Image (cartoon, rainbow, N blue to C red):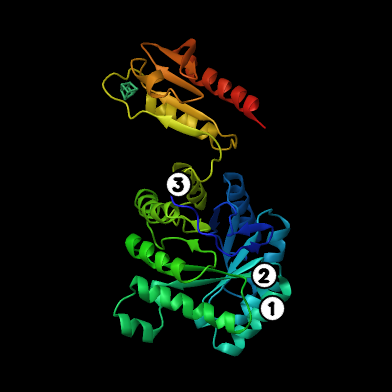
Amino acid sequence: MQTRKNTRQIQVGPVAVGGGAPVVVQSMTNTDTRDVAATVEQIRRLEEAGCEIIRVAVLDLEAARAIRAIRERISIPLIADIHFDHRLAIAAMEHGAQGIRINPGNLGGEAKLARVAEAASAHGVAIRVGVNAGSLEKDILARYGHPTPAALAESALRNVAKLERLGFYEIKISLKSSDALTTVEAYRQLSAACDYPLHLGVTEAGGLIAGTVKSSVALGILLYEGIGDTFRISLTRDPVEEIRVGYELLRSLHLRNRGPELISCPTCGRCQVNLFGLAEEVERHIQKLTTPLKIAVMGCVVNGPGEAREADIGVAGGNGVGIIFKKGKIFKKVPEDQVLEIFLHEIDQMTREHQP
Ligand code: SF4
């Protein structure tokens, strides 16, 4: 893996972004921001799953004002997502948003942008400049014909320059396309052209499977190349799933390690137990654990413990029994109807032992 690019560091509330800080996992709520109770409930579930920065859509003044009440009840920094109306950006910051996401090109001109930048400086708020393939400037689109990677990068840099001219530099940048390879190339070009921290994402990525694959391909390539300081996996699902996928992605790249890792075999003709059910139950149980632990759920004893040699704890199905093993060695043989209960108990025990 290539060394991570040393970007300029900014702060989103207490969370450092860029400049060698860990890659940050973000998500966005899909509740009505004006509904404080529902928004807080969703953010808390996201926090529990490991979300580190949350973005909320701010469509009107009431939503901007709701930020204060939301922030009082959550512990991760909040970014307000604003389009078209600079007054909403200012109101969001006045009500406690620690970051704002805007497209400087659609706020209604330089004077309005200047007021936003001024408020951001006064409140110590970072600005994410977000450029979207669907809303590129007409002249750029005319020159490139399509939202090509170069067109996206040029648009992002043009919008960043608008803030720089105002003396504002607490910036991170995102450029979103729904195409994985366009995303990769656009971020590569952007990364080569500036040292601002970058927020990665593939927009409108799709449902759980399509979205996970598309985002993992694009973000996996970029993160492997050392590009990217924060990211969101966009899924047409409960945003909590975005966080789970995000951490699995970081774990696969050896960038971060949060919570247990579940290894389970795909099963084959040797499997004599209901492995899918067992793996599902184990997965559900470990979702809230934060201690890194490698857990294996294998279908048979022929290859199970061997295939999962690296696991801290595992279970392999047998004929009417489950064999629990630790560090590749058999620890206990238990009747099949008690496997789940005993295995989960052993996982909890080991989690306690591994706690720092
Ligand atoms: S662990 Fe056993 S059941 Fe699972 S795939 Fe390997 S051989 Fe088949």
Q: CA distance from mark 1 to mark 2?
A: 8 Å
Residue 258 percent location from the top left of the image: 56, 40
First along the sequence among labels 3 and 2? 2
Q: Nearer the viewer, residue 271 or 256?
A: 256
Could you tell whether 313 is left or right of 34 in the image? Answer: left
The answer to whether 77 is drawn above or below residue 143 in the figure is above
Which image quarter: residue 318?
Answer: top left
Q: Amino acid at mark 3?
A: Leu
In the rendered image, which residue does mark 2 sit on?
A: 125
Question: What kind of element bears circle 1?
Answer: helix
- Residue at position x 30%, y 76% from top? 146
Q: Amino acid at mark 1?
A: Ala
Q: Quadrant of ligand 1?
A: top left
Question: What kind of element bears circle 2?
Answer: loop
Residue 175 percent location from the top left of the image: 44, 68
- Residue at position x 56%, y 24% from top? 347
The answer to whether 293 is drawn above or below residue 96 in the figure is above
- Residue at position x 61%, y 56% from top? 38
The residue furthest left is 269
Q: Looking at the image, do the residues carrying marks 1 and 2 touch, with CB atoms under 8 Å apart?
A: yes
First along the sequence among labels 3 and 1? 1
Q: Residues within 10 Å of mark 1 (few under 14, many from 20)?
A: some
- Residue at position x 35%, y 18% from top? 300
Q: Amino acid at mark 2?
A: Val
In the rendered image, which residue does mark 3 sit on?
A: 249
Q: Nearer the viewer, residue 15 or 236?
A: 15
Q: Residues within 10 Å of mark 3 (few under 14, many from 20)?
A: many
Residue 21 percent location from the top left of the image: 60, 54
Q: Looking at the figure, which quarter contains the C terminus? A: top right
